[in-house]
Image (cartoon, rainbow, N blue to C red):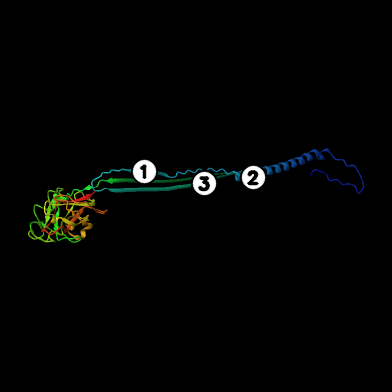
Amino acid sequence: MNDIEEIYLPSHNQHQPVSISNHDWVSVTHNRLTKRFKIWIGVCTVIGIATFFAALLVPILLINGKSTSFSTTTTTTQATSISTTTTSITSTTSTATSTTSTSTTTSATSTSTTSTTSRTTSTTSTSTTSTSTTTYTTSTSTTSTSTTTSTTSTSTTATIGQLPLVSINGTIIGIYKTTVGTNSTTATPGNYIGQYIPTESPYNACDNNTGTKYLSFGTCGETTIDSICGLNTGLYLELQRGLSLIIGLQMCTGNDYPERDPFIISLEGSNLSGTVLNLGTSWTLIYNGPSGLQTDPGRSTCGRFQSINNTIQYKSYRFLVSAKRSISNSVQYSEVHLYGY
Ligand SMILES: [Ca+2]
């Protein structure tokens, strides 16, 4: 345009032809194409912006409407095992039956593991005209609960019977002037006060033989005949078999003189050993009552079974006689039988 010459028009209402050279012409067609081009650019811009917002909004709407979620739940619950074993052995004796029941219960409970993993990946891509955002969310939850219960129950019916009165080291101590709960006074072999006939020792009361007897004079001698002779005498021992539950006893008569038969007897138990058994405090009373010989069963014969209400096991036992049938110089009996298991 710089090469356009300045033209001076004539004054008002004066018309005069002006000569213009060819190179001063501006192409009209060229001006039209420029306008169309600008229109197209505008349209494309609008479409591009619309596409941009569409590309931006559609994924967001899709994501909001449908998030990708993976959820896995595993639950393991209660593995319960109950096992019951019952063993029953029944044996009948002429006297008694008792039952021992042992129950063991073991319970283990474990509850654990709750984990949640969340991972979010965000990718943003930006170009001149578009933005794309993608979001992935993965959620995993695992819960595991395990409960185990085990119950074992064993029931055994034991056989009740006469227990062998075999003592530790073969020691059976004869005693006199002794009552329930008091200290023992040791008797010795002989025929006088505090003695027992040497051939009729306390061992004879524990040999399971009614042909042998234990005879003790107590606070009397062989030649003294009195209602008190032979009372508060007896024996004690620690069983070689160890802990035993005594639930009954039985007395057996000697070969002669029914007036020497025990009438009232006592049984004490202890879980001590040795010399401390001499102390009255070492013993716990288990039975104090009739001997079962109130009705004379005859000589060298066992009397009625005497039931004892006892649930405690002991390994040592003390036996005493506190009353007898009649006036005599002593107390005698062929056997003391203890029943239990
Ligand atoms: Ca005997």
* Label 3 residue SS: strand
Mark 3 and mark 1 residues within 8 Å of each other at the beta carbon: no
Tell me the residue that label 1 is attached to.
83
Q: Amino acid at mark 1?
A: Ser
Residue 282's disc is: none
The image quarter containing residue 66 is top right
Q: Amino acid at mark 3?
A: Ser
Task: Estimate how packed mark 2 is, as few (under 14), some (14 to 19) or many (20 or more) residues with alpha carbons within 10 Å.
Answer: some
In the foreground, 59 or 320: 320
* Label 1 residue SS: strand
Considering only order in the chain, which callout, 1 or 2, is on the residue closer to the N terminus? 2
Tell me the residue that label 2 is attached to.
57
Judged by depth in the image, the label closer to the viewer, 2 or 1, is 1
In the foreground, 292 or 308: 292
Residue 189 relative to residue 248: left or right: left
* Label 2 residue SS: helix
1 relative to 306, above or below: above
In the foreground, 104 or 228: 228
Gap in angstroms between the C-alphas marked 2 and 3 = 25 Å
Q: Amino acid at mark 2?
A: Leu
Q: Position of residue 245 (x, y in %)?
A: 24, 51
Gap in angstroms between the C-alphas marked 3 and 1 = 43 Å
Residue 118's disc is: 3
Gap in angstroms between the C-alphas marked 2 and 1 = 65 Å
Mark 2 and mark 3 residues within 8 Å of each other at the beta carbon: no
Judged by depth in the image, the label closer to the viewer, 3 or 1, is 1
Image quadrant containing the N terminus = top right
Is any part of residue 156 visible from this angle? yes
